[in-house]
Image (cartoon, grey):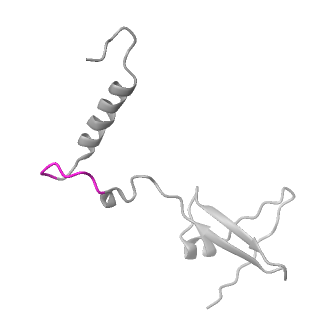
Amino acid sequence: MSYKASATVTSKGQVTLPASIRERLGVTAGDRLDFDLSASGKLTVTAVKRRSIFENFDELQLPSRGRPGTRKDIDDAIAATIIEKFPRPGRRRG
């Protein structure tokens, strides 16, 4: 099923994506649009959604510690790694 809408190109080469198209694609501020221009002149626009690194946090497989890992567990592991890899000057590793 095709869906048509029109937009005008500004003097700066900018186009405002019509609200009806934005809603249909679910495009919001920060999302990207990829353009593909074929040799025949057909332009295809594909919406690429912006994703947060925490969007699919539950899909991460953390090592089992007898209970589910929490964000605190992750923060503690990161802190321990930073201390190990970047010790403060004057401190000895022991």
Above-or-below relation of 52 to 4: above
Magenta-drawn segment? 61-67
Residue drawn at (87%, 58%) of the image: 11
The main secondary structure of the magenta stretch is: loop
* Total numbered badges shown on the rendered structure: 0
Q: Is residue 53 left or right of residue 63?
A: right
The residue located at (84%, 79%) in the rendering is: 39
Residue 10: % across, % down: 83, 61
Q: Residue at image x 65%, y 85%?
A: 3
Which residue lies most toward the top here? 90
* Location of residue 42 with respect to 48 vertically, above or below: below
Q: Residue furthest bottom?
A: 1
50 or 69, which is in the foreground? Answer: 69
Q: Quadrant of the N terminus?
A: bottom right
Q: Position of residue 44 (x, y in %)?
A: 71, 76
Q: Choose between 74 and 1: the one closer to the eye.
A: 74
Q: Between 37 and 12, which is closer to the camera in this rendering?
A: 37
